[in-house]
Image: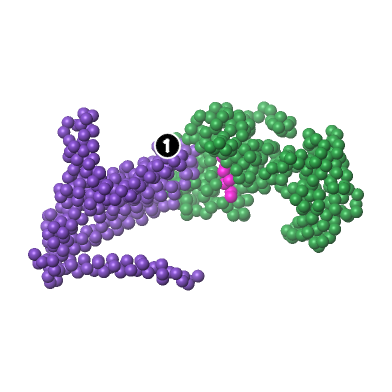
Amino acid sequence: MSKRPFLGWFASPSILIAFGIAASFLAIVQFSLRAHIPGALDPGGFTLDNFTTLWKTVYGKAFVTTVLLCWWTALFTLLIGYPLAYAMVRAKSARLRSAILLISLTPLFLGEIVRTYSWMIVLGNRGFLNATLMQLGVIDRPLDLMFTMTGVVIALVHFTLPIVVVMLAAALSHIDRNLERAATSLGAGRIRCFLTVTLPLSIPGIVTATSTAFAWTFSAFATPQMIGGGKVQTISTLVYQVGFASFNFPLAASLSLVGLLFTIAVLALFNTGIHRLERIGAH
Amino acid sequence: MLTEISAIAPQDTGEDTAVQIDGVSKSFSGTVALEPIRLKVRRGEFLTLLGPSGCGKTTLLNLIAGFLEADEGELFIDHDLVTQVPPHQRKIGIVFQNYALFPHMSVAQNVAYGLRTRRVPKAETAERVREALALVKLEDFADRRPRQLSGGQQQRVALARALVIRPRVLLLDEPFSALDRNLRSAMQVELREIQSRLGLTTVFVTHDQSEALSMSDRIAVMSRGRIRQIGTPSQIYDRPENHFVSTFVGDANLFAATLLEKTDATASLDIGTTRLSLATFQEELPEPGPVTLFVRPEQCSLTDPDQPGAIAATVALSVYQGSYAELHLDCSVAENGRVMLRVPASEAMEPGTDVGIALPERGPAIYTTTERET
């Protein structure tokens, strides 16, 4: 039983990858502790200056923007994803179920650049959305969607929806249908049944999906870069700007590192939240 | 068929009907799950729907509960037409196979759920929850979570939760199948006690024939979406009306025979080379020709192989069962080649012994051979 002859072979690719990640991670840590010499690509001597620089308002603002972006994206993804996931799990016809699954998964297959360009076409001043709304007479001036937080959130919601739908659907499908039937037999109508049984029991799934959405959005780059167009500065776009526009690799490295630690902290917070909720809603 | 049954059950007239099923049927995407069913459940009665899986018993239960909509026919509960009434307005108590207790609520909250949906005042709710938990002897577990309880305790919570709303009908969907054997019989007794004390109309679904025989006032044996026989446990066991019921409920020995002649009370038939004259309980015998003769193991007895009227057989296997032994006999005229008899353990015989099987003069039933089905 204890002898698994192929384990070594199966594990070797992952060890190789893990080694690569560890090496690049060490490189970033090393870079973050080196001084920046303007005009030179090679870093200078060891210093902690990069981290003190991060206390500047620009960088602080990027953190705040990123967190806000993640928060709004997670919230709206949840509000749209939950009904979708619910419909997917509960739809009686198998065809409808697979249609919902397919529609909610397409963003994953589109590729980031194609998807983001499409959104630029939709969100622009004379884009699909504004043109339609103006034609219909709902608005008389185009809404500012490009280069705004709203626009970035819309595109990010689309980007995050697949994982949230899939995770929520998994959580919802694990809820015993007999629980809802029991609630119904005890006199609960549809809404009460949902609020008192289905929703509380799906809370662990909601928390997991939300925290994943949070991390997913946190690392998004192309969408805030292209739709935000420099007006919506997140940590990842800032890293790009500092690193590849100013060639300040040490500062970019320390920014990445702090961003990473920040994500870990947020996810850890979610995790404790899950454990607490699981104690309430555990199966 | 129903008219025959009413003749057997003389107290049928004048009794109050709690549930009336009037030609209700159900198909799932073209497959018939339930043929039009007619069934009356009397008030206070414990009625069991018994049948193999896929026979439509659970479909019928779900139709009564309102989880499924009938394709046609009408359903009455307490003389109210409820065919179109959604389940949450039917005032029915259900105990599920897996109990379906709300895991995120305490025992007391589980039991109180049906009262809260009905906006029963708080003080009354607390009182009724306490009463219901006392009824199932779980007063001390009110604050526990369902998963902190044993299977039997969870089942009692499920029962208390269903009873506290004072349902018009209690539906039980194979509630004992998840319990181990000892606990199961204890819970069966307890449930039956509570049910008869409250005089609660109960519809019980099971595939376990011994459970059905021991618990029910009446049993409806189902197969292939139809009720094949309905009657008291002893009617079902002693006077099965057809081939299916005879083999599904209890052990049966079946012989291939030829019906030669029938009169009002007796039938003469050939089993292999043996000619017999039998009296049966059946009101209607099949036409002369190939038939199946059905005899319970306890109605058969062992005799000398040379005895007139005895059917020749050979002992194939003797299975010790404690107080008795099961003798499995090879018999060429039995439908599946085997006959089973129970004898006192001390009279068990060695395999290979030639014996004779003596059939009783009263009791066996004769069915048309074509009627055989699962």
Which chain did the renderer colour purple? Answer: A
Q: Which residues are magenta?
A: B171-177
Residue behind mark 1: A190
**In this orientation, which residue lies closer to the viewer: B155 or A161?**
A161
> In the rendered view, does A36 fall on the left or right side of A73?
left
Q: As drawn, which residue projects farthest toward the left?
A: A38
Q: Quadrant of the N terminus of chain B?
A: top right
Q: How is the image coloured?
A: by chain
Image coordinates for residue A42, horizontal then vertical, percent: 13, 68
In the rendered image of this protein, does residue B146 appear above or below residue B240?
A: below
**In this orientation, which residue lies closer to the viewer: A258 or A190?**
A258
Identify the residue at horizontal 19%, vertical 40% (top origin).
Answer: A124
User: Badge 1: how crowded within 10 Å, few (<14), some, or many (20+)?
Assistant: few
In the rendered image of this protein, does residue B265 appear above or below residue B181?
A: above
Q: Quadrant of the C terminus of chain B?
A: top right
Which chain did the renderer colour green? Answer: B
**In this orientation, which residue lies closer to the viewer: A117 or B114?**
A117
> In the rendered view, does A105 fall on the left or right side of B68?
left
Image coordinates for residue B336, horizontal then vertical, percent: 75, 50
In the rendered image of this protein, does residue B348 appear above or below residue A128?
A: below
